[in-house]
């Protein structure tokens, strides 16, 4: 009888574990669906704004085509400032939440490695609570913390970030600007990268190929090409930053979808294994009960 109770208690424990795992699966499935919805919306926003930023880049390319010798402070490499005299700024884009696999770890690792290898003084600019908390925990000073969340990338936020960076660059308080973010290579692969956005390089400003750009092929720049160039550059930089913000946001949700899918698959496998154990426990309990009934019947026959 004690053996039967033990078997039934074990079966109830297995049932409890199965229920707990099924409840967790509901959460992981819900998070998967939410991330999928946010990913699609962010991609749509990026697609809607892409033609404008392509036209901005094409305008800069046309100016360089018309006047390749045009000078601008945004091209200033400052070769006389090297080593510890040179200040390199890193804009690090992380997430506000975890449960996204190695997403945050990878982008922070790229930022730390780049800062260690450049041999210069560094300034740190951070978007996202995960990055903010990480650097605070390691006592690494954050020079400027953009307080808004990484969950809602907008053109206005990108413009605010670019205005701050461009101002510091023109004031010669920083000599280079790198943006560290996560790029979506394809639907299954993301990659943490560091891209230099200031000073500008002429060879990186290329003409774009789309129908909207073609309509403005005969554009004239007033009052002169240098003034026009300097007025367009902030829009170009904010466009790059906006693209990085959206790519990071998409990559975060893509990583979270994969993490939640892996968690759901593991949970399904655990439920499958626990179901086998539960059926075995039930069968053992039934077998034990039959044995006790048969044993009792045999004992009664012997008594008569």
Image (cartoon, rainbow, N blue to C red):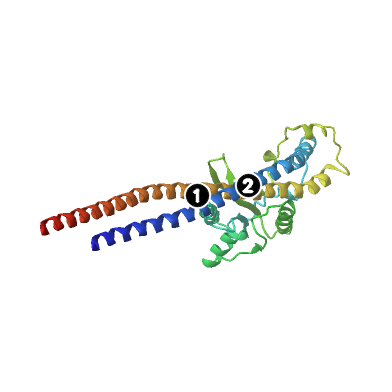
Q: Nearer the viewer, residue 135 or 99?
A: 99
Where residue 55 appears, as percent x and y from the top left, is 77, 39
Which secondary structure lies at badge 1? helix
Residue 113 is situated, as x and y percent measured from the top left of the image, at 51, 54
Mark 1: few/some/many CA within 10 Å (<14, 14-19, 20+)? some
Residue 17 located left or right of residue 86: left
Asked whether the beta carbons under mark 1 and mark 2 sit within 8 Å of each other, the answer is no
Which residue in the protein does label 2 denote? Answer: 37
Name the image quarter holding residue 130.
Answer: bottom right
Q: Nearer the viewer, residue 271 or 2?
A: 2
Residue 72 in view: no
* 290, 64: nearer the viewer: 290
Q: Residue furthest right?
A: 223
Q: Residue at x 43, y 47 (%)?
A: 268
What residue appears at the point 62 percent right and 52 percent down from the top-left corner?
178
Q: Of helix, strand and loop, which one carries label 2?
A: helix
Find residue 56 and report its image quarter.
Answer: top right
Front disc: 1 or 2: 2
Q: Which residue is mark 1?
A: 259
**Mark toward the start of the polypeptide (1 vs 2):** 2
């Amino acid at each position: 009888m004690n053996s039967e109770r033990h078997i039934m208690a074990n079966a109830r424990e297995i049932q409890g574990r199965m229920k707990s795992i099924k409840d967790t699966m509901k959460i992981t499935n819900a998070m998967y669906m939410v991330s999928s919805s946010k990913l699609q919306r962010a991609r749509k926003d990026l697609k809607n704004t892409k033609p404008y930023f392509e036209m901005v880049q094409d305008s800069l390319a046309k100016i360089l085509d018309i006047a390749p010798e045009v000078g601008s402070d945004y091209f200033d490499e400052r070769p006389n400032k090297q080593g510890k005299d040179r200040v390199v700024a890193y804009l690090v884009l992380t997430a506000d939440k975890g449960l996204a696999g190695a997403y945050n770890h990878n982008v922070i690792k790229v930022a730390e490695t780049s800062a260690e290898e450049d041999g210069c003084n560094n300034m740190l600019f951070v978007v996202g609570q995960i990055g903010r908390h990480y650097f605070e925990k390691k006592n690494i000073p954050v020079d400027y913390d953009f307080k808004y969340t990484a969950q809602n990338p907008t053109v206005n936020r990108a413009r605010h970030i670019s205005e701050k960076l461009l101002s510091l660059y023109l004031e010669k308080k920083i000599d280079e600007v790198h943006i560290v973010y996560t790029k979506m290579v394809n639907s299954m692969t993301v990659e943490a990268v560091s891209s230099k956005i200031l000073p500008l390089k002429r060879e990186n400003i290329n003409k774009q190929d789309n129908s909207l750009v073609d309509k403005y092929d005969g554009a004239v720049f007033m009052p002169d090409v240098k003034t026009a160039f300097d007025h367009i550059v902030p829009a170009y930089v904010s466009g790059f930053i906006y693209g990085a913000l959206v790519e990071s946001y998409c990559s975060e949700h893509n990583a979270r979808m994969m993490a939640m899918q892996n968690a759901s698959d593991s949970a399904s496998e655990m439920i499958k294994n626990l179901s086998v154990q539960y059926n075995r426990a039930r069968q053992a309990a039934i077998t034990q009960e039959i044995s006790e009934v048969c044993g009792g019947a045999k004992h009664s026959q012997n008594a008569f």
